[in-house]
Amino acid sequence: MKRSWFVSFEGIDGAGKSTHIEGLATWFKSRGHTVTLTREPGGTPLAEKFRLLALHESMDPLTEALVMFAARREHLIHVIEPALARGEVVLCDRFTDATFAYQGGGRGFDWQVLKTLEQMVQHVPATTLRQPNLTIWFDLSPKVAAERLSSARVPDKFESQPVSFFEAVRSGYAKRMLESPDRFAQIAADQTRDKVWTDVLKAVEAAYMS
Ligand code: TYD
């Protein structure tokens, strides 16, 4: 059972997705898959430069959305599409749903404009609109996430936003899931790490077999 497969991981800051992404990379590798583990914004030298700008410079909302999509285009063309063409499993820490959740939900940027940009940027030779096969949404209340983050490192531009911003981001994810319910697996991230991992594996197995 080997075929190319694209999984994205989403959630508000502090939802705890990182350890599970690493765990899934190991899980797929132990089953004989070649795994490309990557992230957005970022994933190429140029897209990592866009990441630094996006996370640390304040900018106009349209500029912010364009920077996210510019980074995504570079990443898609130079990393994601080639890996999928080689038949690999691509595990991506955030993808386009983050733009809808953060720039659309959090910043209140126009949802339809984001959809237009999505159509342009994710149109690749292999398919008219590249989307993950599965999106795992680590869903957590922003209050709990903020408590988890308070002991973490120096916050970036997004991590230092108030709880109300993350309520809006969370609503953005919920709206995105309603638009593509078959692609999303919503995981309750307020459970123990082991239980979250069990739920992640269940979602991956169900989606991979379908
Ligand atoms: P994150 O993925 O949380 O990485 P780390 O764990 O290293 O902090 O950081 C990326 C931040 O960028 C996060 O706050 C969400 C934000 N972001 C957007 O606002 N829009 C996007 O399209 C993407 C991909 C990320």
Image (tube, rainbow, N blue to C red):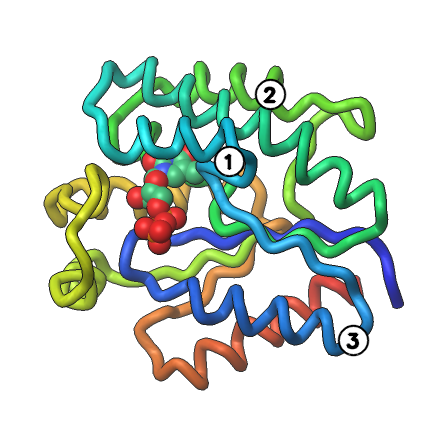
Asked which secondary structure carries label 2, the reply is helix
Q: What residue is pinned by disc 1?
A: 96
Q: Is mark 1 within 8 Å of ligand 1?
A: yes
Counting every numbered tag in the picture gives 3
Mark 2 or mark 1: whose residue is earlier in sequence: 1
Mark 1 or mark 3: whose residue is earlier in sequence: 3
Disc marking residue 31: 3
Q: The residue under label 3 is which amino acid type?
A: Arg
Disc marking residue 121: 2
Q: Residue at x 60, y 70 (%)?
A: 24
Residue 161 showing in the rendered view: yes
| Residue 97 place in picture, x, y as percent | 47, 39
Q: Residue at x 49, y 51 (%)?
A: 93
| Residue 64 place in picture, x, y as percent | 33, 21
Quick check: 142 above or below 116?
Answer: below
- Check the image and name the residue furthest to the right: 1
Asked which secondary structure carries label 1, the reply is helix
Q: Residue at x 81, y 23 (%)?
A: 125
